Amino acid sequence: MASGVKELEGRVGVRDMVRFDPFKIKVEKNFNPRVKETLRANIDRLKPMIASAGGVLQPLWVRRDGEDCILIDGESRLTAVKELIKEGLLPATEGKDDKPFGVPVLCMEGSADEVTRIKYAMTANGGAPLEKWEIGKNYARLINLGQTEEDIATAFGKTPQYIASCLALNDADDTVKHMLVMGEVSEGKAVSAVKKFGSKAAEHIAAAPKNAKGKVVRERKQEFDVKALVKAVRVLLADAAQQGKPVVFEIHSDLVRDVREAMKGAK
């Protein structure tokens, strides 16, 4: 499994596995499962740990494309190493022959199609867990490549409901995603707001009741006049009875249980 890059220019040695010059590894634009904001945060989180360890311990996954070594998984680690070298916090060379400082890599055999590479990059992700909207972004990419939501649910062992919620968060605007990052709203409430209010979700979340920590809490039920509702129902029932007509009530309310109880009391 670790073969495939040994003959490429940029290979700098073998310890327990192939080591490769980080500046020779190419990154496909927009391939990373992460969005740029969390990618930057993850790089900054990893840099002190990698510097302290003297390099990357977990290998990067790559693939060979002709004479190029293309990254599949590990962009945060790769970027962190390159920045640390430039900052002088990791050596530019190593060993007696001063070969370029290397990162450990494992090579995916063959030229896997884009669907397979996306699925692998998501499941092999070795840093901080992906945010749910980042997962949704990649589910959307798979759908654009011909996968169905059912295909995705089977491939990742997730429920259709989970797939749908990830896709909903992917559709949310940046303000909603920022609220999620800052802990101002839970994923569940954000999904509900996006599904119900669409592009107005952020405004709804901002106006929703919050606890002392600024996090959205469950909205209190609005008070309504039960007696007036019961009176109105009785009038309708009496009128319908005189005319010998059946009555069908269609209720549009977030307080369906309360309305049902009121109607029962009116019979």
Image (spheres, helix red, strand yellow):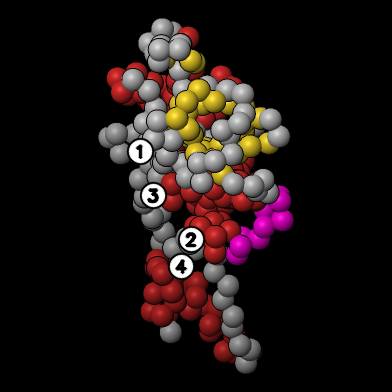
Label 4 vs 1, first from the N-terminus: 1
Up the image or down, 139 lies above or below 3; here it is below
Q: Nearer the viewer, mark 3 or mark 2?
A: 2
- In this view, 123 is above or below 102: below
Real-space CA distance between mark 3 and mark 2, rounded to the nearest whole angstrom: 29 Å
Q: Which residue does the image show at 58% across and 26% down from the upper left?
A: 25
Label 1 to label 3: alpha-carbon separation? 12 Å
Give the extent of the magenta segment. Answer: 143-151
> Which residue is identified by label 2?
158
Q: Are marks 3 and 4 in contact (CB under 8 Å)?
A: no
Residue shown at the point (53%, 82%) measured from the top left: 237
**x, y percentage for residue 80?**
45, 21
Do the residues under discs 1 and 3 have CB atoms within 8 angstroms?
no
Question: In the picture shown, does residue 21 fall above or below 254?
Answer: above
Q: CA distance from mark 3 to mark 4?
A: 15 Å
Q: CA distance from mark 4 to mark 1?
A: 26 Å
Mark 1 lies on residue? 215
The residue under the point 72% across, 56% down is 146
Classify residue 27 by image quadrant. Answer: top right
Q: Report the mark closest to the observer, 1 or 3.
A: 1
Q: Select label 1 or label 2 by which is in front.
A: 2
In the foreground, 130 or 257: 130
Instruction: Identify the residue at the far top of this view.
Output: 88
| Image coords of residue 138 (percent x, y) | 59, 45
Residue 52 or 227: which is nearer the viewer? Answer: 52
Q: Identify the residue under disc 4.
A: 256
Q: Which residue is mark 3?
A: 219
Identified by mark 4, the residue type is Val
